[in-house]
Amino acid sequence: GAGVSQSPSNKVTEKGKDVELRCDPISGHTALYWYRQSLGQGLEFLIYFQGNSAPDKSGLPSDRFSAERTGGSVSTLTIQRTQQEDSAVYLCASSPRLAGGANTGELFFGEGSRLTVL
Amino acid sequence: AQRVTQPEKLLSVFKGAPVELKCNYSYSGSPELFWYVQYSRQRLQLLLRHISRESIKGFTADLNKGETSFHLKKPFAQEEDSAMYYCALSGPSGYGNKLVFGAGTILRVKS
């Protein structure tokens, strides 16, 4: 496959609805990240998956946000009871692992899912 | 805690002028620093990393541990350099090191 694939590319929803955003990482990449990109806030870390380790959820802004990664590949970011302040571009990235297990530090980003909450 | 500060939201320069995008970081250990770039309508992508000590598209960045800085520099700006630039930091390569980004700086190169 080409690169990291995200869907949907655009999502408009009403306040209070739940949304799911999907990320297909590059095959073989063990690390997967979710970031939120919004004007004035830059690139905000949300969650990080690394192989079979417990995910680093330290960036999730509230318990309305959750993410899972099935089979070490596809990931879904779920936002429950969306609020207008959730409007942003949600970026997914994946990263390969070097021989020996270290991360390279180079992230390959998707094109993002633009979420608009009315 | 990991923190990256990019003090300028927007930097506007004329073509041919020198460019310096500032980045300061906070990290208790030995960090790895990166610059990422996002051109208009393109994906965010890696520009350079400090451990490689390389020059990419004429840009260089030196890690200054004393000043905890990793400023991005180019001696002569080109119009095609106009983009959003993000400085990023992680702990030493290994398991469980997330990448934390700064707020970004928009570079506009005017003709």
Image (tube, coloured by chain):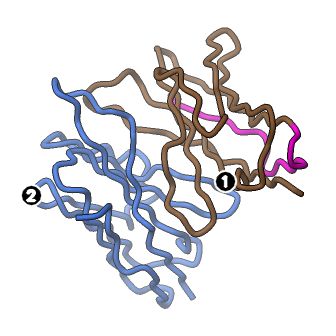
Chain colours: A blue, B brown
Q: Is residue A45 left or right of residue A68?
A: right
**Residue B37 image offset from top left, x and y in percent:** 58, 49
Against B78, is B35 above or below?
A: above
Q: Is residue B55 left or right of residue A59?
A: right
Q: Is residue A12 left or right of residue B39?
A: left
Tell me the chain of label 2.
Answer: A
Disc 1 marks a residue whose amino acid type is Met
**Residue A88 image offset from top left, x and y in percent:** 55, 70
Foreground tag (1 vs 2): 1
Reply yes or no: does residue B10 show up in magenta: yes
Disc 2 secondary structure class: helix
Tell me the chain of label 1.
Answer: B
Instruction: Residue at 77%, 48% (x, y): give it.
Output: B78
Mark 2 surroundings: few (<14), some (14-19) or many (≥20) residues within 10 A: few
**Residue B48 image offset from top left, x and y in percent:** 53, 34
Q: Which residue is mark 1?
A: B84
Against B11, is B49 above or below?
A: above
Reply yes or no: does residue B98 show up in magenta: no
**Residue A52 image offset from top left, x and y in percent:** 12, 43
User: Quick check: do tags 1 and 2 share a chain?
Assistant: no
Instruction: Residue at 81%, 51% (x, y): give it.
Output: B10
Indicate which disc residue A71 carries.
Answer: 2
Disc 1 secondary structure class: strand
Instruction: Residue at 71%, 39% (x, y): give it.
Output: B6
| Highlighted range, magenta | B1-17
